[in-house]
Image (cartoon, rainbow, N blue to C red):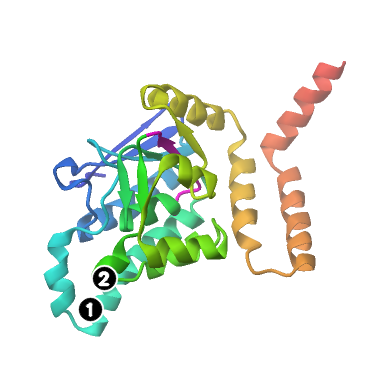
Amino acid sequence: MTYERILYEAKDSIAQITLNRPEKRNALDELTLEELARAMAQAGEEAQVKVVALKGAGKDFCSGIDLSALPKIREATILENLEDASRLVGLFLTMRQLPKPIVALVRGRALAGGCGLATACDVVLAAESAQFGYAEVKIGFVPAIVTALLRRNVAEKRAFELVVGGQVVDAREAERIGLINHVYPDDEFESETSAFLNALTQNSASAMALTKRLLYRIDGMTFEMAMQTGAEVNTLARMTEDVRRGVQQFLDRKK
């Protein structure tokens, strides 16, 4: 596939997807959202890819929706705006349903829709100087689509403060409240994130896929239903080639 707004490279079991609009702080326009969805789907289809890494070119991860789209939003009809918003919904659903871990590598600012994009990833790794925030409220917008994701990441009162206050938090604070997973010193970011990604590639692809599916499926289930779903996934895992091979290797070591 060819892309205009992003860079795509699959190497050593990792698909690197890079937002490539550094002059626009990697702002999200219609084409970028479409290409991101296509790139995620491509990574999902490539058998050699076990992990997806998402990052931004230049100084920032992503500044959110391209401001040049604001006049169009103001003048659009309800149905046109609904269609536009649905593109972001489609991307986030593609990411959630992708059977491979998606890791956001955040340098610089991840703001508004850019913070939402990072939140939509399964894991978020940040440089110490990175910043996060949902600033939409300051111009009358609502970070409505990402709220479903944010509410599953942080406590309710913290989520409320983030989306209603619109404040920007640094990486350490984002880690403390559970918005992101890990923070690394700026000068160690490349080496630490590479080590993290490489460690994931050593895991069973089928086990990671089943685990991701289970984790997100049990949202909203009763305890009993979640336990039963876990038993079903456990059964499926036992039938995979990775488990057969892993069990055999374990038994061989015991001899």
Q: Which mark is residue 80?
A: 1
Specify the amino acid type for callout 2: Asp
Report the front residue among 94 and 168: 168
Specify the amino acid type for callout 1: Glu
Between the residue at mark 2 and the residue at mark 1, the CA separation in whole angstroms equals: 6 Å
Report the front residue among 9 and 125: 125
Q: Is residue 201 left or right of residue 55?
A: right
Where is 32 relative to 203, above or below? below
**Circle 1 crowding by C-alpha within 10 Å: few under 14, some 14–19, many from 20:** few
Q: For numbered disc 2, what is the local secondary structure?
A: helix
Residue sitting at x 37%, y 39%: 106
Is residue 56 visible to the viewer in this orientation of the structure? yes
In the rendered picture of this protein, how many numbered marks are placed on residues?
2
Where is 161 relative to 48, above or below? below
User: Which image quarter: residue 163?
Assistant: bottom left
User: Which image quarter: residue 232?
Assistant: bottom right
Residue sitting at x 78%, y 55%: 231
Residue that badge 2 annotates: 84
Image x and y of residue 202, in percent: 58, 28
Where is 250 relative to 159, above or below? above
Image x and y of residue 150, in percent: 48, 60
Image x and y of residue 111, in percent: 31, 52
Image x and y of residue 234, in percent: 75, 50
Q: Are marks 2 and 1 in contact (CB under 8 Å)?
A: yes
Q: Quadrant of the C terminus?
A: top right
Magenta range is 120-128
Q: Is residue 98 left or right of residue 165?
A: right
Residue sitting at x 50%, y 48%: 122
Is residue 124 visible to the viewer in this orientation of the structure? no
